[in-house]
Image (cartoon, helix red, strand yellow):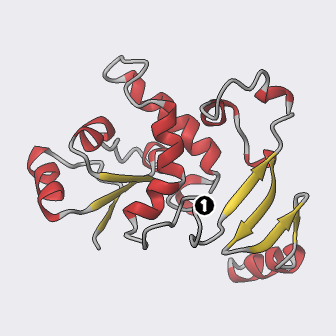
Protein backbone atom coordinates (compact mmCIF):
# COMPACT_ATOMS: atom_id res chain seq x y z
CA UNK A 1 0.00 0.00 0.00
CA UNK A 2 1.22 3.47 -0.86
CA UNK A 3 0.08 6.34 1.33
CA UNK A 4 1.09 9.78 0.12
CA UNK A 5 1.17 12.35 2.89
CA UNK A 6 0.34 16.03 2.40
CA UNK A 7 0.09 16.15 -1.45
CA UNK A 8 0.07 19.95 -1.32
CA UNK A 9 1.86 20.31 -4.64
CA UNK A 10 -0.07 17.59 -6.51
CA UNK A 11 -1.01 18.65 -10.03
CA UNK A 12 -3.39 16.96 -12.50
CA UNK A 13 -0.71 14.51 -13.64
CA UNK A 14 0.05 13.58 -10.02
CA UNK A 15 -3.63 13.12 -9.21
CA UNK A 16 -4.09 10.86 -12.21
CA UNK A 17 -1.04 8.83 -11.18
CA UNK A 18 -2.40 8.45 -7.63
CA UNK A 19 -5.65 7.07 -9.04
CA UNK A 20 -3.87 4.81 -11.54
CA UNK A 21 -1.65 3.30 -8.83
CA UNK A 22 -4.42 2.98 -6.22
CA UNK A 23 -2.56 5.14 -3.73
CA UNK A 24 -4.10 6.69 -0.65
CA UNK A 25 -3.60 10.19 0.69
CA UNK A 26 -3.27 11.51 4.23
CA UNK A 27 -3.92 15.23 4.35
CA UNK A 28 -2.71 17.35 7.27
CA UNK A 29 -4.10 20.84 6.65
CA UNK A 30 -3.08 22.55 9.91
CA UNK A 31 0.54 21.45 9.58
CA UNK A 32 0.58 22.51 5.92
CA UNK A 33 -0.89 25.90 6.84
CA UNK A 34 1.46 26.47 9.77
CA UNK A 35 4.48 25.72 7.59
CA UNK A 36 3.01 27.62 4.61
CA UNK A 37 3.56 24.51 2.50
CA UNK A 38 0.30 24.73 0.59
CA UNK A 39 -3.05 23.00 0.64
CA UNK A 40 -3.91 19.57 -0.67
CA UNK A 41 -6.54 19.65 -3.44
CA UNK A 42 -8.99 17.80 -1.22
CA UNK A 43 -12.08 18.19 -3.37
CA UNK A 44 -10.16 16.95 -6.43
CA UNK A 45 -8.83 13.97 -4.45
CA UNK A 46 -12.32 13.07 -3.30
CA UNK A 47 -13.90 13.60 -6.71
CA UNK A 48 -11.43 11.10 -8.16
CA UNK A 49 -12.47 8.51 -5.60
CA UNK A 50 -9.12 8.34 -3.84
CA UNK A 51 -8.94 6.97 -0.31
CA UNK A 52 -8.25 10.05 1.81
CA UNK A 53 -7.51 10.17 5.52
CA UNK A 54 -7.17 13.13 7.83
CA UNK A 55 -3.99 13.45 9.85
CA UNK A 56 -2.22 15.95 12.06
CA UNK A 57 1.36 15.30 10.86
CA UNK A 58 2.96 15.74 14.29
CA UNK A 59 3.12 17.97 17.30
CA UNK A 60 6.41 19.36 15.93
CA UNK A 61 4.82 20.80 12.80
CA UNK A 62 1.28 21.32 14.06
CA UNK A 63 1.60 21.89 17.83
CA UNK A 64 -1.34 19.54 18.21
CA UNK A 65 -2.33 16.00 17.48
CA UNK A 66 -5.99 16.74 18.04
CA UNK A 67 -8.15 15.31 15.25
CA UNK A 68 -11.14 17.33 16.44
CA UNK A 69 -9.24 20.56 15.77
CA UNK A 70 -8.02 19.11 12.49
CA UNK A 71 -11.55 18.27 11.32
CA UNK A 72 -12.76 21.78 12.12
CA UNK A 73 -9.84 23.45 10.34
CA UNK A 74 -10.05 21.16 7.30
CA UNK A 75 -13.78 21.79 6.98
CA UNK A 76 -13.21 25.53 6.92
CA UNK A 77 -10.01 25.88 4.89
CA UNK A 78 -11.42 23.85 1.99
CA UNK A 79 -14.49 26.09 1.74
CA UNK A 80 -12.58 29.36 1.25
CA UNK A 81 -11.30 28.46 -2.18
CA UNK A 82 -13.51 27.59 -4.17
CA UNK A 83 -15.90 29.70 -2.09
CA UNK A 84 -18.24 26.77 -1.55
CA UNK A 85 -19.71 26.25 1.95
CA UNK A 86 -20.36 22.58 1.22
CA UNK A 87 -17.15 21.79 -0.70
CA UNK A 88 -16.21 19.07 1.78
CA UNK A 89 -19.20 17.99 3.88
CA UNK A 90 -18.74 17.58 7.62
CA UNK A 91 -19.80 13.94 7.39
CA UNK A 92 -16.94 13.25 4.97
CA UNK A 93 -14.40 14.84 7.32
CA UNK A 94 -15.72 12.81 10.24
CA UNK A 95 -15.26 9.69 8.11
CA UNK A 96 -11.74 10.79 7.09
CA UNK A 97 -10.81 11.10 10.77
CA UNK A 98 -12.22 7.66 11.56
CA UNK A 99 -12.86 4.65 9.32
CA UNK A 100 -11.48 6.18 6.13
CA UNK A 101 -8.14 6.46 7.91
CA UNK A 102 -8.09 2.69 8.35
CA UNK A 103 -9.15 2.28 4.72
CA UNK A 104 -6.41 4.62 3.47
CA UNK A 105 -3.82 2.60 5.39
CA UNK A 106 -5.04 -0.59 3.73
CA UNK A 107 -5.97 -2.24 7.00
CA UNK A 108 -8.05 -5.38 6.84
CA UNK A 109 -11.77 -5.04 6.29
CA UNK A 110 -13.64 -4.24 9.45
CA UNK A 111 -11.13 -1.74 10.86
CA UNK A 112 -12.84 1.51 11.59
CA UNK A 113 -16.28 -0.07 11.83
CA UNK A 114 -18.46 -1.43 14.59
CA UNK A 115 -19.10 -4.87 13.16
CA UNK A 116 -18.80 -8.37 14.61
CA UNK A 117 -15.19 -9.56 14.48
CA UNK A 118 -13.74 -6.09 13.88
CA UNK A 119 -11.14 -4.73 16.30
CA UNK A 120 -12.88 -2.82 19.06
CA UNK A 121 -11.34 0.63 18.63
CA UNK A 122 -13.69 3.33 19.81
CA UNK A 123 -14.15 6.46 21.83
CA UNK A 124 -17.05 7.54 24.00
CA UNK A 125 -17.83 11.24 23.90
CA UNK A 126 -19.65 13.31 26.50
CA UNK A 127 -22.38 14.83 24.33
CA UNK A 128 -23.83 16.80 27.25
CA UNK A 129 -21.27 19.59 26.92
CA UNK A 130 -22.78 23.06 26.33
CA UNK A 131 -20.83 23.55 23.09
CA UNK A 132 -22.47 20.39 21.69
CA UNK A 133 -26.02 21.61 22.24
CA UNK A 134 -28.37 21.07 20.62
CA UNK A 135 -26.89 17.87 19.23
CA UNK A 136 -28.66 17.40 15.90
CA UNK A 137 -26.17 15.05 14.26
CA UNK A 138 -22.62 13.67 14.56
CA UNK A 139 -21.57 16.36 12.05
CA UNK A 140 -21.59 18.79 14.99
CA UNK A 141 -18.46 17.00 16.25
CA UNK A 142 -16.57 18.36 13.22
CA UNK A 143 -17.19 22.01 14.09
CA UNK A 144 -17.77 21.96 17.84
CA UNK A 145 -16.21 18.79 19.25
CA UNK A 146 -13.03 18.84 21.30
CA UNK A 147 -10.55 16.26 22.48
CA UNK A 148 -11.58 17.11 26.03
CA UNK A 149 -15.05 15.74 25.23
CA UNK A 150 -13.62 12.21 24.96
CA UNK A 151 -14.31 10.34 28.18
CA UNK A 152 -13.43 6.74 27.33
CA UNK A 153 -11.04 5.16 24.83
CA UNK A 154 -10.94 1.48 23.90
CA UNK A 155 -8.17 0.18 21.65
CA UNK A 156 -8.43 -3.33 20.23
CA UNK A 157 -10.89 -4.17 22.98
CA UNK A 158 -8.65 -2.87 25.79
CA UNK A 159 -9.85 -0.02 27.96
CA UNK A 160 -7.04 2.58 27.89
CA UNK A 161 -8.87 5.70 29.12
CA UNK A 162 -11.77 5.67 31.59
CA UNK A 163 -13.45 8.88 32.72
CA UNK A 164 -10.53 10.82 31.18
CA UNK A 165 -7.98 8.87 33.26
CA UNK A 166 -5.13 7.12 31.42
CA UNK A 167 -4.97 3.49 32.45
CA UNK A 168 -2.00 2.13 30.50
CA UNK A 169 0.70 4.77 30.95
CA UNK A 170 1.98 7.05 33.68
CA UNK A 171 1.39 10.48 32.16
CA UNK A 172 3.71 12.34 34.53
CA UNK A 173 6.57 9.92 33.86
CA UNK A 174 5.92 10.02 30.12
CA UNK A 175 6.06 13.84 30.12
CA UNK A 176 9.30 13.73 32.14
CA UNK A 177 10.84 11.35 29.60
CA UNK A 178 9.74 13.54 26.69
CA UNK A 179 11.35 16.60 28.30
CA UNK A 180 14.57 14.63 28.86
CA UNK A 181 14.62 13.48 25.24
CA UNK A 182 14.02 17.04 24.08
CA UNK A 183 16.89 18.27 26.23
CA UNK A 184 14.74 20.40 28.49
x%, y% of residue 43?
A: 30, 35
x%, y% of residue 108?
A: 43, 73
Is residue 109 placed above or below 143 in the rendered structure?
A: below
Q: Is residue 164 left or right of residue 57?
A: right
x%, y% of residue 145?
A: 70, 37
Is residue 132 placed above or below 62 in the rendered structure?
A: above
Asked if residue 184 can be seen in this view, the reply is: no
Q: Is residue 18 left or right of residue 30?
A: left
Residue in the image at 82% along x and 79% along y: 168
Residue in the image at 16% along x and 49% along y: 15
Image quadrant in which the N terminus is located: bottom left
The foreground one among 62 and 83 is 83
Q: How many marks?
A: 1
Is residue 131 placed above or below 99 in the rendered structure?
A: above
x%, y% of residue 35?
A: 44, 49
Residue in the image at 53% along x and 51% along y: 97
Query: Label 1: which residue?
Result: 59
Q: Residue furthest front?
A: 116
Residue in the image at 62% along x and 42% along y: 69
The residue carrying pointer 1 sits among few (fewer than 14), some (14 to 19) or many (20 or more) residues within 10 Å by Cα, namely few
Asked if residue 59 can be seen in this view, the reply is: yes
The foreground one among 43 and 108 is 108
Label 1 residue SS: helix
The foreground one among 113 and 102 is 113
Image quadrant in which the C terminus is located: bottom right
Amino acid sequence: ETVCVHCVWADERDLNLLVERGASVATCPQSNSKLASGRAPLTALLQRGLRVALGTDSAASNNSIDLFREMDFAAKIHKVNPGDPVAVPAQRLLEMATWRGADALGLAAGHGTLTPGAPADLILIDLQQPHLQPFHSPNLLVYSGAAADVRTVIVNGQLVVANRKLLTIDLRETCNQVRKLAGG
